[in-house]
Image (spheres, grey):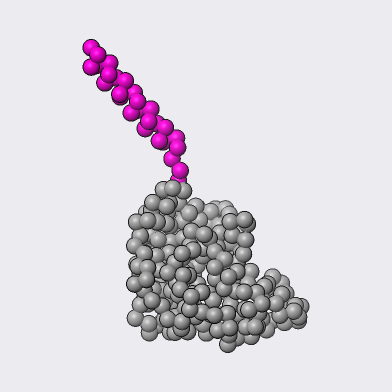
Amino acid sequence: MKTIVGIWVLTGVIFFHCKQSERNFNPQKSTTHQMEKHEFPGDSLDFSKEYLLGKFNPATHPDFVKIDSKHTTKTDVYLRKDAYDAFVKMHDAAQKDGVKLTIISATRNFSSQKSIWEAKWNGDRMVEGKNLATDVKDSTERARIILRFSSMPGTSRHHWGTDIDINDLNDSYFLSGSGKKEYEWLVSNAHKYGYYQPYTPKGTERPTGYEEEKWHWTYLPISKILVKQYPEKVKLSEINGFKGAGTAITIDVIKNYVLGINKACLP
């Protein structure tokens, strides 16, 4: 009889412990465990300064592959093979859940980023309804306005072939309807495939850098290594070759923008 009572007591203790574990479950801790499953090559990958600055052609680089038309809205767009393989798995999993993920921007080298930057700098492309060339004379202020959503050439994560823009480039798209469903799926599942959002909301956790970009996702197993090597190999004075480059030093674009990202994406 004592044995039976003991078993009942032990069973009750185990049941209570399990229910407590369920109540104390923290999704954020689960995300951490998922991240730990991905292999981080660490120091086994050594990137050149030219690679870090985006001064290469992804179409001819051995680590890059052209993105299949079924995964992108663009033609002749490239991504690192490892990042693309992970995206395909994520895309297929999302599709099974009724969510469509489409790459609308991937690798942009120095030349491509220079075209975007200088179009805004010169006033050929309006920024927030302004012609910056005529409306903002102070060069540092002009650079800061562009830097709300666009990187200086040589500092963009899109140089590396690890970062993609998904579905839309407007924050409002992801606040309702299908866009909200897509973003919520990414927040809950992207980490399973190595993808993280580098530009989370700005605040005490991320006081510097670009504004939040719900569409921008990075393949962390590789981009984390690139973020580590960037300030080790690139000097502020080497961010040059485009109009307004002198502001890179006054703004300290490496500290405040290259490293001004989600803490989960820092080395």
**Percent coordinates x, y for residue 68 in the rendering:** 38, 72
- Would you place residue 217 above or below residue 143 in this image? above
Asked whether 31 falls inside the magenta stretch, the response is no
Say if the magenta span includes residue 14.
yes
Q: Relative to 55, is 180 above or below? A: above
Residue 22 position in % (x across, y down): 41, 36
The residue drawn where x is 24% and y is 16% is 4
Q: How many marks?
A: 0
In the image, taking residue 109 as reference, residue 44 lies left or right, namely: left
In the picture, residue 208 is in which quadrant?
bottom right
Work out whether residue 3 or residue 176 is closer to the camera in this orientation and state it.
3
Q: Residue at x 64, y 85 (%)?
A: 243
Image height check: is 5 above or below 92?
A: above
Q: Which residues are magenta?
A: 1-27
| Residue 186 showing in the rendered view | yes
Visible residue check, residue 114: no
227 vs 88, nearest the viewer: 227
Q: Answer with the quarter of the image where residue 255 lies.
A: bottom right
Looking at the picture, how far across and down is residue 220, in whole percent? 43, 64
Within the image, what quadrant is residue 141 found in? bottom right
Measuring from the top left, give residue 41's x and y in whole percent. Answer: 35, 67
Q: Is residue 199 above or below residue 175?
A: below
Residue drawn where x is 27% and y is 19% of the image: 6
**Between 198 and 180, the one nearer to me in the picture:** 198
- What's the magenta bit mostly, secondary-structure-wise? helix
Instruction: Name the residue located 23 percent from the left edge and 17 percent from the top edge.
Output: 3
